[in-house]
């Protein structure tokens, strides 16, 4: 396999922004087919990523996915993979790299109705904490606590 065909994650560069925006907007259009396609614009991407650190997944010089995360909040906010690259390890690489750049106990949210994404996060070692307002919150437990995953997924306080 040629060196440039290898999948790698790296910090976003200025020249990557349009490719990331295209992946983001394509996903939004697919998720909301009832909304006219021209209602989605680059400004949507700019607003969604304004306060986030971004990393990209690159294969053969092409951007095939990106993740946005907020280190102060210890949260992964965005993870998008180009449709042609799905199921090829891109999401797992981005999730692992974003997690590496955050502290133990990082968290994220996804739509509760998206069973495939929920299964993906669970397969990557994330634990569901609960569901609210149509979203599920996940936490990435400290690796030393992984034997206690069932405890981490249970509410610690009951009011």
Image: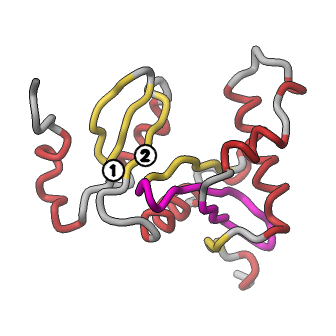
Residue at image coords 63%, 62%? 54
Measured in 3D between alpha carbons, the distance from the residue under mark 1 to the one under mark 2, in whole angstroms, is: 9 Å
Provide the residue span drawn in magenta: 53-74
Picture colour scheme: secondary structure
Q: Which mark is residue 138?
A: none
Most common SS among magenta residues: strand
Q: Is residue 85 magenta?
A: no
Residue at image coords 61%, 71%? 9
Q: Earlier in the sequence, mark 1 or mark 2?
A: 2
Figure quadrant of the C terminus: top left
Q: Residues within 10 Å of mark 1 (few under 14, many from 20)?
A: many
Residue 38, relative to residue 54: is it above or below? above
Estimate the x, y position of residue 91 in percent, counting from the top left.
56, 55
| Labels 1, 2: front one | 2
What secondary structure is marked by label 2?
Answer: strand
Estimate the x, y position of residue 90 in percent, counting from the top left.
59, 59
Residue 27, relative to residue 51: is it above or below? above
Residue at image coords 43%, 54%? 73
Residue indicated by mark 2:
108
Figure quadrant of the N terminus: bottom right
Answer yes or no: do the residues labelled 1 and 2 have beta carbons within 8 Å? yes
Quarter location, residue 42: top right
Residue indicated by mark 1:
126
What secondary structure is marked by label 1?
Answer: loop
Q: Is residue 70 magenta?
A: yes
Furthest residue in direction top, as rendered = 34
Q: Residues within 10 Å of mark 2 (few under 14, many from 20)?
A: many
Furthest residue in direction bottom, as rendered = 3
């Amino acid at each position: 396999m040629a060196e440039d065909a290898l999948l790698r994650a790296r910090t976003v560069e200025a020249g990557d922004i349009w490719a990331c925006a295209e992946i983001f907007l394509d996903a939004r259009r697919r998720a909301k087919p009832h909304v006219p396609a021209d209602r989605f614009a680059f400004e949507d991407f700019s607003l969604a990523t304004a306060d986030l650190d971004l990393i990209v997944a690159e294969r053969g010089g092409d951007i095939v996915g990106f993740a946005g995360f907020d280190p102060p909040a210890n949260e992964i906010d965005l993870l998008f993979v180009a449709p042609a690259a799905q199921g090829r390890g891109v999401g797992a690489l981005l999730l692992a790299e974003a997690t590496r750049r955050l502290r133990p106990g990082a968290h994220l949210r996804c739509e509760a109705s998206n069973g495939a994404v929920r299964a993906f996060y669970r397969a990557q070692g994330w634990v569901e904490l609960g569901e609210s307002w149509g979203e599920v919150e996940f936490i990435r437990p400290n690796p030393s606590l992984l034997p206690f995953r069932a405890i981490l997924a249970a509410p610690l306080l009951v009011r």
